[in-house]
Amino acid sequence: MAKKLPPEFRQYLSKLGRKGGLKGGPARAAAMTPEQRSESARRAVTARWDRQTKERSGKRAGDSG
């Protein structure tokens, strides 16, 4: 079983991960061509729509879902 990390170290790692996360998206977009960005955005929208449709279908009365 792994040992627990001291709270100070956990806080440091948390801040470090957030810093990398904030850089990741813009850096990825800057490295893409406009066509690649468009395709990525299209896939993201489709995923959101699919998820919303799935959530709505589960809330219908009588749905065996």
Image: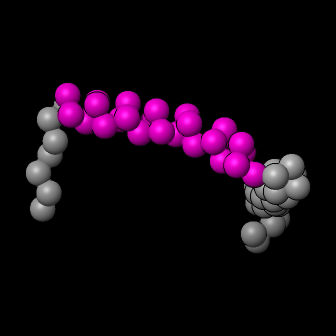
Q: Is residue 60 visible?
A: no
Colour mode of the rendering: one colour
Residue drawn at the location 41% of the way across and 39% of the way down: 17
Q: Is residue 18 visible?
A: yes
When the figure is inspected, residue 52 is found, relative to residue 17, above or below; the finding is: below
Nearer to me, 54 or 18: 18
Identify the residue at the far bottom of this view: 64
Rendering coords of residue 10 (x, y %): 25, 36
When the figure is inspected, residue 54 is found, relative to residue 9, above or below; the finding is: below
Residue drawn at the location 31% of the way across and 37% of the way down: 13
Quadrant of the image containing the C terminus: bottom right
Quadrant of the image containing the N terminus: bottom left
Direction from residue 2 to residue 15 in the image, left or right: right
Q: Which residues are magenta?
A: 8-32
User: Is residue 27 in the magenta section?
Assistant: yes
Nearer to me, 3 or 42: 42
User: Is residue 36 in the magenta section?
Assistant: no
The picture quadrant where one finds residue 8 is: top left
Rendering coords of residue 51 (x, y %): 76, 57
When the figure is inspected, residue 9 is found, relative to residue 36, above or below; the finding is: above
Nearer to me, 51 or 11: 11
The picture quadrant where one finds residue 59 is: bottom right
Residue drawn at the location 76% of the way across and 71% of the way down: 64
Rendering coords of residue 33 (x, y %): 82, 52
Residue drawn at the location 72% of the way across and 45% of the way down: 29
Direction from residue 6 to residue 22 in the image, left or right: right
Direction from residue 30 to residue 50 in the image, left or right: right
